[in-house]
Image (cartoon, rainbow, N blue to C red):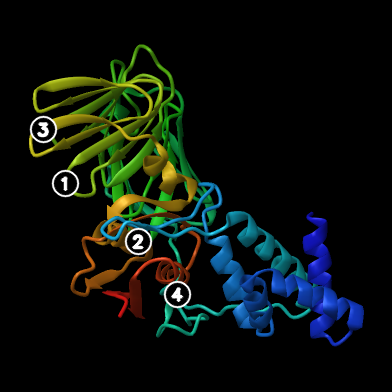
């Protein structure tokens, strides 16, 4: 635990309880004068709901990326936030809250729709982030809802274990007839899920996505089909290559990790480890780690753009690297299940940055408003995006 942060937290608590002496008040005043954020956070601490908002807002900033900046390329402006300063303030406030509100924590009430009251007091309401949720469609027509609870299902000689956001397939012995029985996992908007296939391959499935797969793979290959976005960690099996199909394209791997994105009616696959082969439009290309293959309008292209963007969602954050506002909002809309309406002149402006997906919608909007020229209105699950006046 940071000693200075703990000391300041104690001073804050004593000040709010009118238990501090003159020396302690002066020490706290000096801390507030070091940076305007210290003073602003100190003022907001006097309101329990304001405190929770600040902590959740600060925690939504992506520290893993080591920076937080959004760049509007059309104006060639860069905005920066001192991550160490933000982290220090967040730690101080977290410690103070745990001391001051230990016996009377503030609890946010919510309903089953995921729409809650807005604690930032800037919008009509707030929307909670996505959760672990999916539906599993079996070959016999049965449908199993998957979610946060742990449960198991029996299907012929196959056992399905649903383990808090992950469904695991296991079967023994091998039944060749199972290769003809196809199941599908469908994840709605505002959802995500992970599946472990019978060969041990792990698949993370993003919001508004699906994967079709046989209950057991055949003797010569392991083939699945995807729609939306999924990340694969393929179990090694030199005798049975792993294949991912999307329309007329095919990705082939043995034991490797890669991301597949088909959201905008195009195939984009990024290799993070190992090697994959992409077959599309009569062309075959091999990828090395960090490379991305894109199939669009009967063209196959290879780019070296790194893995950060492709793997961010799996790691729990949004990552924008020069995307325009409409692309950013499409990703946010899938995660919060929104309808987005744009004001004039905002759709094509480009931004960069990282935000944790655990933040509420209002917190995401507040941060984007702080460091860009966008402003927002939230009404139920409708999001209105405009340019700042």
- 388 shown above or below 294: below
Disc 2 marks which residue?
A: 332
Q: Are marks 1 and 2 in contact (CB under 8 Å)?
A: no
Q: Quick one: SS at disc 2?
A: helix
Work out whether mark 4 precedes mark 1 in sequence or the reverse, and give the earlier one. 4
In percent of the image, x 26 and y 70: which residue is there? Answer: 340
Disc 4 marks which residue?
A: 112
Depth check: 29 or 62 in front? 29
Q: Quick one: SS at disc 3?
A: strand
Work out whether mark 3 precedes mark 4 in sequence or the reverse, and give the earlier one. 4
Tell me the quarter of the image containing the C terminus.
Answer: bottom left
Disc 3 marks which residue?
A: 299
- Residue 126 seen in the figure: yes
Measure the C-alpha gap from mark 2 to mark 3: 28 Å
In percent of the image, x 8 and y 39: which residue is there? Answer: 297
Return the mark for residue 222: none
Q: Are marks 3 and 1 in contact (CB under 8 Å)?
A: no
Measure the C-alpha gap from mark 4 to mark 1: 32 Å
- 232 shown above or below 353: above
Measure the C-alpha gap from mark 3 to mark 4: 44 Å
Badge 2: residue crowd in 10 Å (few <14, some 14–19, many ≥20): some
| Residue 164 picture location, percent across and down | 53, 51
| Residue 309 picture location, percent across and down | 38, 43
Work out whether mark 4 precedes mark 2 in sequence or the reverse, and give the earlier one. 4
Badge 1: residue crowd in 10 Å (few <14, some 14–19, many ≥20): some
Residue 206 left/right relative to 8 = left
| Residue 327 picture location, percent across and down | 26, 56
């Amino acid at each position: 635990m940071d000693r200075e942060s703990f000391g300041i937290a104690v001073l804050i608590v004593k000040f709010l309880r009118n238990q501090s002496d003159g020396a302690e008040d002066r020490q706290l005043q000096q801390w507030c004068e070091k940076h305007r954020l210290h003073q602003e956070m100190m003022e907001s601490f006097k309101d329990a709901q304001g405190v929770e908002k600040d902590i959740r807002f600060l925690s939504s900033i992506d520290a893993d990326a080591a920076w937080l900046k959004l760049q509007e390329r059309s104006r060639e402006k860069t905005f920066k936030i001192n991550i160490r300063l933000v982290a220090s303030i967040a730690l101080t406030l977290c410690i103070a809250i745990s001391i001051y509100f230990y016996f009377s924590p503030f609890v946010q009430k919510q309903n089953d729709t995921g729409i809650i009251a807005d604690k930032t007091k800037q919008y009509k309401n707030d929307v909670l982030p996505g959760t672990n949720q999916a539906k599993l469609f079996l070959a016999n027509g049965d449908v199993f809802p998957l979610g946060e609870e742990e449960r198991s299902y029996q299907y012929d000689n196959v056992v399905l274990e649903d383990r808090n956001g992950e469904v695991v397939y296991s079967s023994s012995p091998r039944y060749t007839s199972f290769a003809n029985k196809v199941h599908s996992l469908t994840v709605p908007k505002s959802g995500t899920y992970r599946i472990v296939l019978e060969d041990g391959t792990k698949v993370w499935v993003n919001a508004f996505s699906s994967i079709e797969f046989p209950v057991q793979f055949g003797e010569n290959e392991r083939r699945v089909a995807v729609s939306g976005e999924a990340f694969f960690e393929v179990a090694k099996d030199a005798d049975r290559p792993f294949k991912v199909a999307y329309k007329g394209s095919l990705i082939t791997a043995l034991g490797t990790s890669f991301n597949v994105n088909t959201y905008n009616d195009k195939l984009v696959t990024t290799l993070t480890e190992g090697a994959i082969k992409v077959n599309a439009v009569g062309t075959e290309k091999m990828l090395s780690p960090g490379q991305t293959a894109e199939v669009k309008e009967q063209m196959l292209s290879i780019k070296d753009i790194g893995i950060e963007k492709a793997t961010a969602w799996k790691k729990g954050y949004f990552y924008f690297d020069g995307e325009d506002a409409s692309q950013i909002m499409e990703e946010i809309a899938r995660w919060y299940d929104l309808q987005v309406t744009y004001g004039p002149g905002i759709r094509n402006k480009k931004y960069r940055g990282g935000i944790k997906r655990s933040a509420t919608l209002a917190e995401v909007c507040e941060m984007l408003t702080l460091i860009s020229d966008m402003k927002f209105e939230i009404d139920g699950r409708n999001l209105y995006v405009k340019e700042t006046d």
